Image (spheres, rainbow, N blue to C red):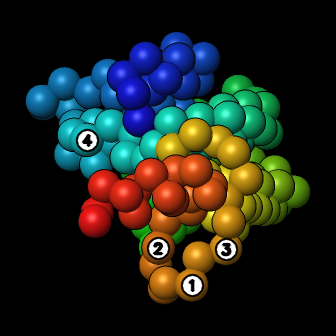
C-alpha cells in the first residue's frame, strides 16, 4: 500500500495501527506491521478503512493493536494481538464477524484499484479487475 494511504489509516486509527510507530526497543517493533507496513494493494484501502472504523467503534475505550495486515492466498488478512478481556461477548463476536466478512469479501475487490474483481481460476491468485488482470498478463508476455 502506498505510504500516504497507510499514513491515513494510521492517523485515523492511531491505536489500532500503533505498530507503525514502534521503535526498535518496543515489543511491537517485532510485529510484521511495524517492520513491513500494510502489505496489500491500494484497492483495499476502502475496505480497510471501513473495517478499522468498525473495529475501533466496537472496542470503545479498549485498545486493539494490529500485528499484521496483508494479502495472502488472494485475500485480505487482518491479524491483531488479541482482544481485551473487558470486551463483552457481543463485542468480540461483532469484531470477529467483521474481520471474517472483510477477509472473505476482499476477493471480490481488485487489490490494485478497488474495482469489482473477476473470478480467477488459478488457486491462490490475487483479486484483480479485468483491466488490472489484463495489464498484468500483457507485462508477463
Q: Of residues 17 and 60, which is closer to you in this image?
A: 17
N-terminal-most mark, 4 or 2: 4
Q: Residue at x 54, y 24 (%)?
A: 9
N-terminal-most mark, 3 or 2: 3
For residue 84, above or below residue 71:
above
Please give the residue where the numbered disc 3 appears in the rendered image: 119
Task: Identify the image quadrant of the N terminus.
Answer: top left
N-terminal-most mark, 1 or 4: 4
Q: Of residues 35 and 23, which is closer to you in this image?
A: 35
* Gap in angstroms between the C-alphas marked 3 and 4: 29 Å
Q: Are marks 3 and 1 in contact (CB under 8 Å)?
A: yes
For residue 115, above or below residue 13:
below
Q: Of residues 65 and 122, which is closer to you in this image?
A: 122
For residue 65, above or below residue 98:
above
Q: Residues within 10 Å of mark 3 (few under 14, many from 20)?
A: some
| Residue 11 in picture, x, y percent from top left | 52, 14
Q: Nearer the viewer, mark 1 or mark 2?
A: 1
Please give the residue where the numbered disc 1 appears in the rendered image: 121
Q: Are marks 1 and 4 in contact (CB under 8 Å)?
A: no
Please give the residue where the numbered disc 2 appears in the rendered image: 125
Q: Residue at x 28, y 48 (%)?
A: 32
Label 2 element class = loop
* Gap in angstroms between the C-alphas marked 3 and 2: 10 Å
> Residue 37, located in which quarter of the rendered image?
top left
| Residue 94 in picture, x, y percent from top left | 82, 55
Task: Identify the image quadrant of the C terminus.
Answer: bottom left
| Residue 104 in picture, x, y percent from top left | 69, 67
Amino acid at each position: 500500500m502506498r505510504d500516504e494511504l497507510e499514513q491515513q489509516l494510521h492517523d485515523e486509527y492511531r491505536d489500532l495501527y500503533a505498530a507503525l510507530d514502534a521503535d526498535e526497543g518496543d515489543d511491537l517493533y517485532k510485529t510484521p506491521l511495524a517492520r513491513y507496513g500494510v502489505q496489500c494493494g491500494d484497492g483495499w484501502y476502502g475496505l480497510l478503512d471501513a473495517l478499522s472504523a468498525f473495529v475501533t467503534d466496537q472496542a470503545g475505550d479498549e485498545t486493539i493493536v494490529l500485528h499484521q495486515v496483508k494479502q495472502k492466498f488472494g485475500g485480505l488478512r487482518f491479524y491483531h494481538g488479541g482482544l481485551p478481556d473487558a470486551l463483552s461477548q457481543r463485542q468480540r463476536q461483532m469484531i470477529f464477524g467483521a474481520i471474517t466478512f472483510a477477509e472473505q469479501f476482499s476477493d471480490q475487490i481488485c487489490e490494485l484499484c478497488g474495482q469489482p474483481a473477476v473470478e480467477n481460476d488459478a488457486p491462490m491468485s490475487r483479486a484483480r479487475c479485468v483491466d488490472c488482470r489484463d495489464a498484468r498478463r500483457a507485462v508477463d508476455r
